[in-house]
Amino acid sequence: MLIQFQWLHSELSNICKSLLRVKQLHALLLKTHLSNDPFYATQFVRLYAANGDINSAYHVFDKSSTRSVFLWNSMIRAFAQSQRFYDSISLFRTMLGGADIRPDDYTYACVIRACADNFEFGMLRVVHGSLVADGLGLDPICCSALVTAYSKLGLVHEARRVFDGIAEPDLVLWNSLISGYGGSGLWDVGMQMFNLMRFVGKNPDGFTLAGLLVGVADSGRLRVGQVLHGLSKKSGLHSDSHVGSLLVSMYSRCKYMASAYRVFCSIFNPDLITWSALIAGYSQSGEYEKVLHFLRKLNMENTKPDCVLIASVLASIAQTANVGLGCEVHGYVLRHGLEPDVRVSSALIDMYSKCGFLNLGICVFRMMPERNIISYNSVILGLGLHGCASEAFRMLYKMLEQRLVPDEATFSSLLCACCHAGLVKDGREIFRRMKDEFNIKARPEHYVYMVKLLGSAGELEEAYNLTQSLLEPVDQAILGALLSCCNSLGNSELAEIVAQQLFESNPADNVYRVMLSNIYAGDGRWDDVKKLRDKMTGGIRKKPGLSWIEGSYCQL
DNA sequence: CGGCGTTCAG
């Protein structure tokens, strides 16, 4: 018997990756007098959960007569990590209700994280109150979990209040707050906290720099990013894989691909995420041939692209309308079973419809096991771009039936559909519903579509009134769209007014002067053309346009 | 058994 237990111990300490093996070991344990030992129960809860059998995990927990804190914590964590938030919370409540055992810092850390992951603000408040009542209000682990959770829910001020309650925050707590500011777009406050942290004598680690870099990369502040780059070099943290990836990503988002590549090269053994950051950078900067080049290089390293990388490669293929390549990637997706992934499928839909193969995009959409708002938006945009406005609207209603909430991009696609089909009435109506019914504030892109829609229907006055109802400064894209409508309708009086507004906000840009000059020319007002041309200094040379489509004309 | 950081799709 003893030999068997030693053997069991060593099996348990190995990572048990087979559910069958776990079941065999468990059956063996049940035959012994140790089956009631909370230590073994805890081990099996974890093993079952790690192998995806949450029901068996709960069975073990449920049948245990003596339950240690470890056992409770493991079960709560198992539920939380299997996306069963309500089961994990109800177990936590049971624990609170029972008199014999109290949650400890481990329990709270897990529950707090689960609340944040599920955006359960009300529950987070309850948990926070409860941990204070349990005397853990100043516990460093609970506090850093709270700081992260509040920040994730967009309540950085709450996070700050927790932080300020601690007399001597440890490094993790500093890092949590700094990441919280970074993730909430307040990178400058994050930098202030960072300086304060160094002032009180704490040395930053990789987490600190990563937290700062996330915010700086999002805001595209190249100078600050460069300072952080220097700082990470000085402390030897640039070789940290997370910091390295973030530096690549930061330079990529600033469109500084040469620097991004230099950082990439300085990383000893770049992982898939670092590669993806670089390749995504080339994709977003429009250097599409580099995307393929590095994809091939990655292939030679014997590393397989994952869903995230495939999605960004597909986005760059969509931009170049290279459907042959898109099909190759689709083949890769099918061979590796990546099609069920919403990110991959949404990117495929977009790629096919931007390449001119709407039907193939719709096929992918129909095959999807689960669809989210992005999948619907992709297919709505595809339909709209191909002039199928009524199908686009039908898709909106299907999406609403699935209880998905449309966002700004949904309405952008619908307005695009109305523009392509010339549906002025439906465009006006959906624009109104977006604001009144769905409480979405119209963004510049929505106004651009509305102006185009009204302008192309000859409703110039209504389009002009719409732009004048906006707060100053009006986005140039909106006024530019209006000016372009004036051009096609030959209305030089309104064009003058609109162009004047554009010149005031952006005196250096000659694009709109050229447009106005063309409108004058169309009216035969050559004196005005000359006056305008004289005001233009510097280059007014047009960049040559490039366009190509591969294979779009073959019928499938 | 724990608290902080990395790539992506419309």
Image: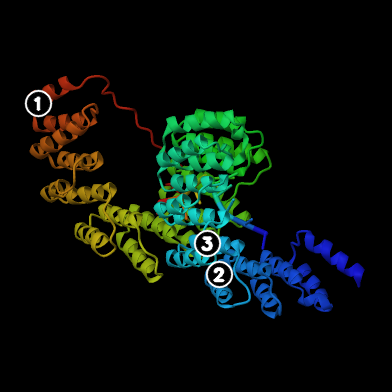
**What is the C-alpha distance between the residues marked 1 and 3?**
67 Å
Considering only order in the chain, which callout, 3 or 2, is on the residue closer to the N terminus? 2
State whether discs 1 and 3 lie on one chain: yes
Q: Is residue A188 left or right of residue A425?
A: right
Q: Quadrant of residue A298?
A: top right
Q: Chain of mark 3?
A: A
Q: Chain of mark 2?
A: A
The answer for which chain carries disc 1 is: A
Residue at point 16%, 51% (across, down) = A457
* Quadrant location, the N terminus of chain A: bottom right
Q: Which residue in the protein does label 1 denote? A: A528
User: Circle 2 is placed at which residue position?
Assistant: A84
In percent of width and height, residue A469 lies at: 15, 49
Q: Is residue A208 visible?
A: yes
Q: Position of residue A433 (x, y in %)?
A: 24, 63
Name the quadrant containing residue A373: bottom left
User: Residue at left 66%, top 36%?
Assistant: A269
Look at label 1 and name its amino acid: Asp
Q: Quadrant of residue A276?
A: top right
The residue type indicated by label 2 comes to: Arg
Q: Nearer the viewer, residue A494 or A264?
A: A264
Ranked by sequence position, the earlier of labels 2 and 1 is 2
**A437 in relation to A224, above or below:** below
Closest to the camera, between mark 1 and mark 3, is 3
Q: Nearer the viewer, mark 2 or mark 3?
A: 3
Tell me how far mark 2 sits from mark 1, CA to CA. Answer: 70 Å
Q: Which mark is residue A112?
A: 3
Check whether the beta carbons of the residues at disc 1 and disc 3 lie within 8 A of each other.
no
- Residue A320 against residue A542 in the figure, above or below: below
